[in-house]
Amino acid sequence: MSIKQIKKQFPNVTMKENEPLANYTYTETGGPADLLIFPKTEKEVVELVTWIKEFDLPLTVLGNASNLIVKDGGIRGVVMILTDMKAIVVEGNRVIAQSGAKLIDTSYAGLKASLTGLEFACGIPGSIGGAVFMNAGAYEGEVSEVLESALVLTSEGEVKRLSNQELEFSYRHSALQTNGSIILEAVFALKKGDHEMIQKRMEELTFLRESKQPLEYPSCGSVFKRPTGYFTGKLIQEAGLQGKIWGGAQISEKHAGFIVNINQATATDYIELIAHIQEVILKNTGVELETEVRIIGEDPIV
């Protein structure tokens, strides 16, 4: 099946050919997608995925692309971005959010309903799908602590609800990273709380984030997972790497755990700087830094 056939079969779905993914990633880097698709409903996702798999086309599903690096060669086949699926509904003590909804917006929906549990997420820029996929967390909270269930499209084409236990959460990990399911919706079980207390906590965390993180530059968020017994930023500082520039990318002078795009950086700049950091830290301390950021796509043709 050709791209032309997909467009003919789904005339009402927004599609873009050879679209630079730098237009969608938080790093503002990344090569083109052969075909970029923006479904708006669960039904469209199911139908599109069925067609795409029937004709054996490669499929990559993205959310807000905030903790992601797409290589400069781009992504072959079809890339599906779910950010048009962004409905958030509150039912009693539950907040139900579609996969493309922003985690930040979902936390504020909890605040509006005086529900506590999602305060930690008020500054995490990812989508619900991405947050569940990687068990996103910050400030001693993480998605697994409040997620009741997730509605997914399995690799076998079945729409199925998975419980928290079935998602097999661990630090920055879920079963979705290996089982090929696509998240359609998440249900968060929260608790009634005091509106002013919830708001105060969210304001405190927003202040901490804005004062410590380099939000004034494009970045991919926290680059590395925290190694047991260490703080990544401190390791990088002690190695004398903070502020190092590699092409158009720089280890942030504000927070050494971030790499920022200061001058038209490429994804290759990011990837090479990440490898350099890992090499230096391993040599200096014996600590192997594991990336939290996902790196996907094709290398550029030289």
Image (tube, rainbow, N blue to C red):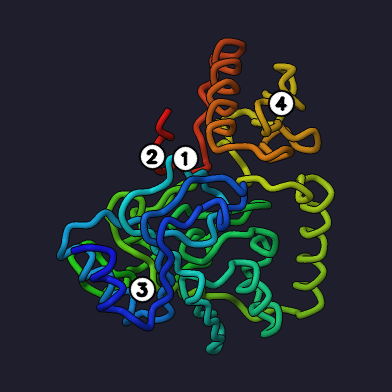
Identify residue for label 3. 151
Q: In terms of depth relative to the viewer, which is nearer, 165 or 293?
A: 293
Quadrant location of residue 14?
bottom left
Q: Quadrant of the N terminus?
A: bottom left
Q: Secondary structure at mark 2?
A: loop
Q: Are marks 2 and 1 in contact (CB under 8 Å)?
A: yes
* Residue 88 visible somewhere in the drawing: yes
Q: Are marks 4 and 3 in contact (CB under 8 Å)?
A: no
Q: Closer to the observer: label 1 or label 3?
A: 1
Mark 1 Cα shell of 10 Å, populated few (<14), some (14-19), many (≥20): many
Q: Are marks 1 and 3 in contact (CB under 8 Å)?
A: no
Identify residue for label 2. 298
Dot 1 amino acid type: Lys
Mark closer to the chain start, 1 or 3: 1
Q: Secondary structure at mark 4?
A: strand
Q: Quadrant of the C terminus?
A: top left
Mark closer to the chain start, 3 or 2: 3
Mark 3 Cα shell of 10 Å, populated few (<14), some (14-19), many (≥20): some
